[in-house]
Image (tube, rainbow, N blue to C red):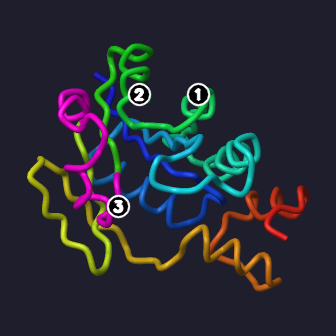
Amino acid sequence: MKKVGLLGGTFDPPHLGHLIIAEEVHRSLELDEVWLIPSHVPPHKSGPLADGKARLEMTERAVADNSHLAVSDIELEREGKSYTVHTIRQLKENYPDAKFFFIIGGDMVQYLPKWHAIDRLLEMIEFVGVKRTGYLLESPYPIHEVEVPAIEVSSSMLRERLKNGMGTKYLLPDRVLEYIKEHGLYD
């Protein structure tokens, strides 16, 4: 059975922090692949600044040189709010021979009891909690814990830097920055 990690997010834009998480979980849990899944409209955030097509293209560029990272557009194909349970149900139907590991940041672990259809999710996937500074991975649910080198970078911080003409060297993959400049995103 193929072991696949799933890392969801707006990826607005995708940055090195996302890639470090994907790589460390891949290595730590000995997964076959990790799929990055740009969300349509996450239920806990307002809409992204860049459209789905742009975020998909940037994410594909971000992982282009890594053979065990891939991108799925499964959530961008759906309209409206995107709940994890809907995505997982569809992935299980499309890939019945895969075992899925859903990757979340340490800040999200404490909210698991409030997730939509959490009991159903626990039947379909295993959760992976990525340790983050200032957050404990305490949950009433089973969670694989993965240590990830700390890098304080966020998409919102990068959008602000880009808007103000500040540098993003070593924070964004070069291919992503090229796409942002080519399409005038975040000005």
Comes first in the chain, label 1 or label 3:
1
Q: Of helix, strand and loop, which one carries label 1?
A: loop
Q: Residue at x 36, y 48 (%)?
A: 26
**Label whose residue precedes the other's in the sequence (2 or 3):** 2
Image-quadrant location for residue 180: bottom right
Q: Position of residue 164 (x, y in %)?
A: 80, 84
Amino acid beneath label 2: His
The residue that label 1 is drawn on is 78
Is the C-beta separation of discs 2 and 1 under 8 Å?
yes
Which disc is residue 105 wearing? Answer: 3
Task: Indicate the amino acid at tag 1.
Answer: Arg
* Quadrant of the snapshot with the N terminus: top left
> Along the line of sight, which residue is nearer the eye, 58 or 87?
87
Q: Which mark is residue 111?
A: none
Q: Are dots 2 and 3 in contact, CB under 8 Å?
A: no
Residue 107 among magenta residues: yes
> Residue sitting at 26 percent across and 34 percent down?
117
Residue 84 forms part of the magenta stretch = no
Instruction: Indicate the amino acid at tag 3.
Output: Gly
Q: Which residues are magenta?
A: 104-125
Q: Position of residue 58 (x, y in %)?
A: 71, 51
- Please determine whether, in this image, residue 120 is positioned above or below residue 179: above
Query: What residue is drawn where x is 25% and y is 33%?
Result: 121
Q: Which residue is mark 2?
A: 86
